[in-house]
Amino acid sequence: MLTNLARKILEKITPYTPGKPIEEVQRELGLSSAMKLASNENPLGPSPKALEAIRQALPNLHRYPDGSGYYLVAKLAKTLNASPEQLILGNGSDEVITFAARAFIEPGDEVIIADPTFLIYRIAAQLAQAEIRIVPMNGFRYDLAAMKKAVTPKTKLIFIANPDNPTGTYLTRAEVEAFMEGLPARVIVFFDEAYAELVDAPDYPDTRVYLEKHPVIIARTFSKAYGLAGLRIGYGLSSAPLIEAMHRVREPFNVNSLAQAAAIGALDDAAHLEATRLLLRDQKKYLMNALKEFGCEVVPSATNFILFKAGPNAGQTAEALLKRGIIVRHMKAWNLPEYIRVTIGLPHENQAFIESLKETGRNHS
Ligand SMILES: Cc1ncc(COP(=O)(O)O)c(C=O)c1O
């Protein structure tokens, strides 16, 4: 029950429900081990270089972190061929989404969001008292033509996850180019590229090309390809004036010192990133084939997870997998009750998932 002291707008907000801690799932079900394939994390774990950077930063935990993220920002600027004024660090890229909503949305402004997509856009926009325009996807892909049509004189922000979560599909350079063409300059486009480093497709766009032409914000994260989800660190790349506006809504010490150190270490570990990409490429093939062989409809994925149709009993299937210690995401919260999203794990985890799926004998359509 929401207290009547809360802001009225909170009544409309469906809270994000995270999964239970893996240890709790194990305890409740009396399992000796469990496999978490539910939150699109890196199955290889963090880079050893990130761990070493954390160890070195530990003795200084009594100090506040560097509120400007000086060294990490400088490193990112170099890596991305941008200037430090074009960057902002966030406590996860989630926070960059909230920066954009807080910095740019006036009550009543319109925000365009696809469906199904990452749920945080809607929450952030609702809190900013935006009018939300939902544009359904087409075959689990962003319908950019429809999103462009939804633009009105009141549109302020458009969220585009590329690739998308939970579908895993991506938009091509040509599609994004056509979308950006002629878009009014008062509309900010937010490209959420949480999975960018994992995309293999040669026609995946480099949205930095728009930085000088249009107000765009590109958000990236260390939670996925870099295996640092637990530390909460991501960043936004934009034009200096937009970044300046976002700094005004940022808490002064929003990114902790271990996260900053680890991110620098992770950026130095090209081998870990490559190993992650190779594992994904290989295991995605395995999982896709196994799911198809089993008769499931699968959505093509440019990411480290797969959305598949498990049928009318998808909820029970997810429960049955859970009882066997395999945690996947039933897609009910996205209004896809017949679907399950599974994160690509280590080879033995993926095999265990497929075997358990077969054994649960789920009743797909
Ligand atoms: C599309 C998308 N954007 C952003 C995020 C947030 O990532 P983080 O806040 O960990 O950087 C996620 C996490 O699942 C995601 O899937």
Image (tube, rainbow, N blue to C red):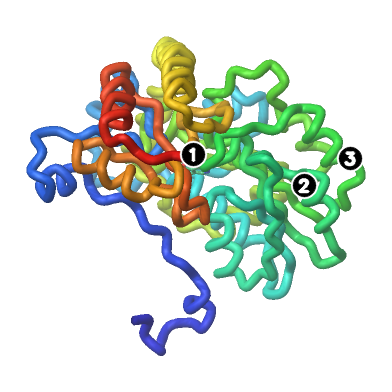
Q: Residue at x 26, y 36 (%)?
A: 326
Residue position marked by numbered label 2 in the rendering: 215
- The residue indicated by pointer 1 is 309
Q: Residues within 10 Å of mark 1 (few under 14, many from 20)?
A: many
Q: Which residue is mark 3?
A: 181
For label 2, the crowd category at 10 Å Cα-Cα, with few meaning under 14, some 14 to 19 and many 20 or more, is some
Give the residue type that dot 3 points to.
Glu
Q: Give the residue type that dot 1 points to.
A: Lys
Question: If you read the primary sequence from the N terminus, does the residue marked by circle 2 or circle 3 appear first?
Answer: 3
| 222 versus 7 height, above or below | above
Q: Quadrant of residue 259?
A: top left
Which corner quadrant of the image does residue 108 belong to? bottom right
Q: Residues within 10 Å of mark 3 (few under 14, many from 20)?
A: few
- Locate residue 118, reporting x and y percent: 54, 49
| Residue 58 image point, x, y percent | 22, 35
> Residue 321: horizontal and vertical position, in percent?
27, 39
Q: Decide: marks 1, 2 in contact (CB < 8 A)?
A: no
Q: Nearer the viewer, mark 2 or mark 3?
A: 3
Q: Residue at x 40, y 89 (%)?
A: 4
Question: Spatial distance from mark 2 to mark 3, Cα to Cα?
Answer: 13 Å
Residue 252 point in image, percent of width and height: 45, 55
Residue found at the very far bottom of the displayed protein = 4
Residue 130, image quadrant: bottom right
